[in-house]
Amino acid sequence: MTYDAEPPFPAQQPPPLYAPPTLHTAPEPAPELPVYTTVEPLIESAEEPAARPKPARRKGADAGRQRALIMRTARKTLEIHQADALTKGLLATVVGTSGSADEIAYAVLSGGAKSIQSAVDALSIIDADVLEAGIHAAALGRARLRSVWRVFAELGVVAGEAPSSDAKAAIALVRALHEGDTGAVRADIDAAVSLANR
């Protein structure tokens, strides 16, 4: 005896292989977009901070500084003008200018400590140990060594131009220096430095 039993799950239809065609309908009109008459920036520019007002220059202070500079220049020019010829000529060689008092004063005041570097280097060679003075002179480098050579040439310690070799120039300079009166040479250089720093 047989029974027609219902299947445990309802039969499922397989998906269609293609979508059934739909009736052709007119496309819906696209929504109207708003019309902009101006272009808005995408990123708001940060407002620049207001520039701080510059403090008013004190005319009185500026005039005072200018007057002080003029007086200092005039005083230095007078001091150089009244110096002896040797000291004035040596200081002109040290600062690298002509022998006129106003040009020397300008070079000293505008250059500061650097303007008398060659005199400082010359004194360091005089004060160095005899065995180390040549090494010390050569270690200055070509430019500074030749400036020192011109200082000693102004005092008659050496003559002519420095040798092209730094080592030979240093040896010749130290040898000539210690063959003469180093005390007198130092005194002359000290006088020129004192005139510049006065």
Image (spheres, grey):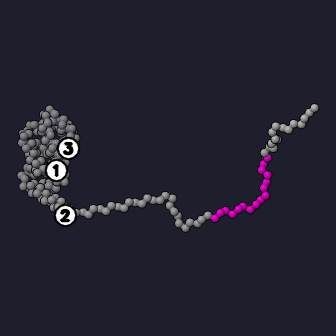
Q: Secondary structure at mark 3?
A: helix
Picture coordinates of residue 36, whole percent (x, y): 56, 66
Question: Is-magenta flag for residue 62?
Answer: no
- Quarter holding residue 153: top left
Q: Which segment is the magenta one?
A: 16-32
Q: Which mark is residue 60?
A: 2
Q: Which mark is residue 66?
A: none
Q: Amino acid at mark 1?
A: Val
Q: Which mark is residue 144?
A: 3
Residue 120 vs residue 36: left or right? Answer: left
Picture coordinates of residue 125, whole percent (x, y): 14, 39
Name the residue at 81% across, 44% down: 13
In the rendered image, the quadrant that contains the N terminus is top right
Q: Going by the picture, which residue comes out furthest to the right?
A: 1
Q: Is residue 179 visible?
A: yes
Q: Amino acid at mark 2?
A: Gly
Q: Which residue bears the numbered disc 1?
A: 95
